[in-house]
Amino acid sequence: MTVPLLAMPVGVGAIDLRAGDERARLDAFVRAHEQATPFHLPAWSLGVAQGCGQTSHTLVAEHADGAIVGVLPLTEVRSPLFGKALVSNGFAVGGGILAADAAAIPALADAAWALAERLGCPTLELRGGPIPAEGWQTDTTTYLGFARDLAASDADELLAIPRKQRAEVRKALDGDLEVSVGRAPADRAAHYAVYAESVRNLGTPVFPKRLFRAVLDKFGDDADILTVRANGQPVAAVLSLYFNGTVYPYWGGGTHAARGLRANDRMYFALMAHARSRGCTRFDFGRSKAGTGPAAFKKNWGFEGVPLPYGKRAAVGTEAREINPLDPRYSRKVELWKKLPLWVANQLGPHISRGLG
């Protein structure tokens, strides 16, 4: 007679990422989980906490023998403009509950809500991962994720790009553009200058410089900056993360001149080759809002959008925090921000964006 295995009880507690042994133990669990993202790593939580002055919390589900069976990284975000929220994970497009035992899912979700109540955060957000049904709002229509395998060579990569976009990439390759990759102060300065102009043009406040610096430092060799220059001037740049064989171009953009130079096309094609040289086999183009220009751009490169499940839970009698710039409430502010002088946007932006989470 076969005796069914008894489910092991799951306990949830908080760990301190400043403790090296705990950080290493959590890092190993995340890297071994096939659904993990770089946003589940302790490096991300520590980087965004340091870079934006917010507080990181990490909940871990364990069996009685001490084996980790689930993790939920959280960022406590406080902003005079956008309110308070507990977010998994802060300043990331992913995160959420990462579990190796189904029993860890409700345990972590309940513990996170109890933490949110204790901290006075009326909204709890899960960006990806399993989302409990009871008491949660689930959104699978706002955001799409774009990822696909890398081809074996530059020639094969060109063929993997749909014809119309392939022609644009070929023109970019024929242009007089220089590409460099690095992590030095000059690379960081070039990236920030380009990224700040790019997001201002989109009507979005730029993140603090220290956020990019902290993430680069925490990730070490698993993060770098690729910059495209024209006549010696940076016109496009992207800060990328490398995790479990996948490259994540995360903070990227181009100046006003980049479009005419096709510098963004050159940048992403160069990043594919660079990632391949690092041993990556997959390219994660990140998320975009459904029906937007960025989503169409990624589809033109041969990436199919997949709905990303996001969940929110709000305190009774309150509405969940909403920071989507496409919300009609923000449309006028976005248009006004686009018209700000760049130096003004760069002064004001970091004070606002650090509260977005």
Image (spheres, rainbow, N blue to C red):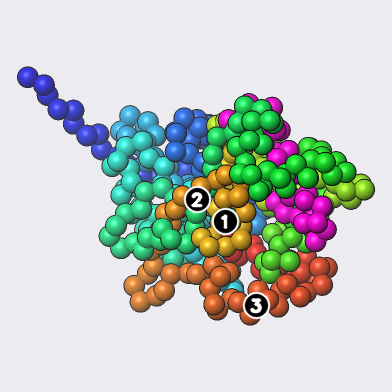
**In what element is the residue under mark 1?**
helix
- Residue 241, magenta (yes or no): no
- Residue 48 is tagged as none
Tell me the element at label 2: strand
Dominant SS of magenta comes to helix
Q: Residue at x 22, y 34 (%)?
A: 7
Are the residues flagged by discs 1 and 2 in contact, CB closer than 8 Å? yes
Distance (Cα) linking label 3 and label 2 = 28 Å
Q: Measure the C-alpha gap from mark 3 to mark 1.
A: 23 Å
Q: Residue 195's x, y, as percent?
A: 75, 56
Vertical arrangement, residue 353 with respect to residue 225, above or below: below
- Is 114 situated left or right of 243 in this image? left
Does the magenta-highlighted stretch encompass residue 266? yes
* Viewer can see residue 215: no
- What residue sits 36% from the left and 44% below the top? 12
Label 1 crowding class (10 Å Cα cut-off): few <14, some 14-19, many 20+? many
Q: Is residue 152 visible?
A: yes
Q: Which residue is mark 1?
A: 295
Q: Which residues are magenta?
A: 252-281
Amino acid carrying mark 2 in the image? Gly
The residue under label 3 is: 333
Q: Name which of mark 3 and mark 1 comes first in the sequence.
A: 1
Question: What residue would you read off at disc 2?
Answer: 305
Asked if marks 3 and 2 touch (Cβ < 8 Å), the reply is no
Amino acid on which disc 3 is placed: Lys
Q: Position of residue 5 (x, y in %)?
A: 18, 28
